[in-house]
Image (cartoon, rainbow, N blue to C red):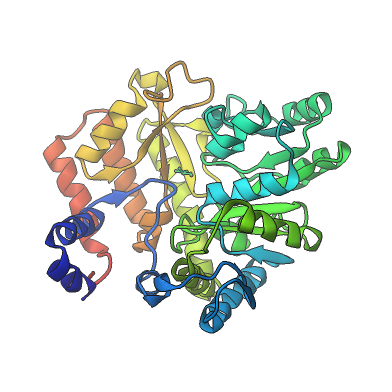
Amino acid sequence: MEIDIIKKTDPEVAKYIELEFKRQQNTIELIASENFTSPAVMAACGSVLTNKYAEGRPYKRYYNGCENIDKIEELAVKRCCELFKCDHANVQPHSGAQANMAVFLYALKTGDTILGMDLSNGGHLTHGSSVNFSGINYNTISYGVDENGVIDYNDVEKKALEYKPKLIIAGASNYSRIIDFERFSKIAKEINAYFMVDIAHIAALVATGVHPSPVSYADFITTTTHKTLRGPRGGIIMCKKEHASGIDKAVFPGIQGGPLEHIIAGKAIALKEAQSEDFKEYAKQVVENSSYLAQELISNGIDIVGGKSENHVMTIDLRKLDKTGKDVANLLEEVGITANKNTVPNDPTSPFVTSGVRIGTAATTTRGMKKPEMKEIASIIADAILEKDSIENLKNRSLNLCKKFPLYENI
Ligand code: DSN
């Protein structure tokens, strides 16, 4: 076992890997952006491929000895294009943030205007937040959601016509509804703006047809590979043919040096896994679980922003209960559930406190949990928040659920 090899060299690190394995086994993982990748993906990421420099693109490298790396990266690109039915893919971005940065570098000049979803309304840091490169180097205009947590498309159009952004960004880190890519693309066309969609959260749903695809509408699509897509930590950019060479140059030499070919091998494997019938079933189940979890929480007296989830994620709204997201996320951790505090639309508190908790079903669905388990999870959450059961008992209920759905045979 890998862990025995690590133990011989570094027992301290090995100890924490083992503890983390136990934590993952014994915790109900509801962080909407997390998942459990396959042993094959993990093995590739820990393979000899980590030793190789391969700056450049397949068959056009700046280093010798890339004949095997070339084939692996070519496979990852081909599988990505097949899975998402896109013209071109660059699988080298180290992360979703780097994927977004490369698109910005290609499509924009410093100071250009971008229109993206506000971070506190569910957008992402790299969609124009003032503390991020995207908000520091570019002039950001933001759109948000209405009281029901639905994107205010009229506001998007109004702001697009008024500010004429060069790039419009759709996609979110915390949005529980289907996104209308066609509507966004019409708005972008009206003002001749580029249209980028960040599908980091919903990648698996898009790949399997459970969520509409932006491929025919967007100039650029970025994603991470480790959320619903269940691959290794990393990013990918997909784009139309006419942008392919510019995007490739923006990734390297624009913002990155040597690609992480061990991770690219992990991406190739995950993309193959995502082409399977099992994965289609998985994505469908993620959405069914999320929709059911939202309903069950509501029947247990817990509000959900917008009252439902149409994808993998939802936000518990604590305003009525006069509790903070920070306290409830900590409470849930005490009872064996990991989630993260999150703002709700028009949140009266700060992003460090918040009035909401974001939860998602990608990870629990990977463990094999279905509706009966969602019912129990909703009940544990509600009993914890409404103080209807003891911490000790709630912890045991979470643990019992985890034990029925073991995670990995070994490490
Ligand atoms: N921080 C990630 C998330 O949790 O959604 C996005 O990068």
Hey, which quadrant is residue 339 in on the image? top left
Q: Is residue 199 visible?
A: no
Left/right of residue 103 with respect to residue 236 in the rendered view: right
Foreground pick, 112 / 172 = 112
Q: Number of marks in the image? A: 0
Q: Residue at x 27, y 28 (%)?
A: 386
Q: Where is residue 342 in the image (x, y as percent from the top left)?
A: 43, 31
Q: Is residue 88 visible?
A: yes
Foreground pick, 356 / 68 = 68
Hey, which quadrant is residue 353 in on the image? top left
Q: Where is residue 155 in the image (x, y as percent from the top left)?
A: 73, 26
Q: In this view, does 156 lie above or below 408?
A: above
Foreground pick, 257 / 234 = 257
Q: In this view, does 268 lie above or below 311?
A: below
Q: Residue at x 48, y 20 (%)?
A: 347
Foreground pick, 249 / 244 = 249
Hey, which quadrant is residue 55 in on the image? bottom right
Q: Position of residue 178 (x, y in %)?
A: 63, 45
Q: Position of residue 298 (x, y in %)?
A: 42, 35
Left/right of residue 305 with respect to residue 155 in the rendered view: left
Please state, as top left, top right, bottom left or bottom right, where the C terminus lies in the image: bottom left
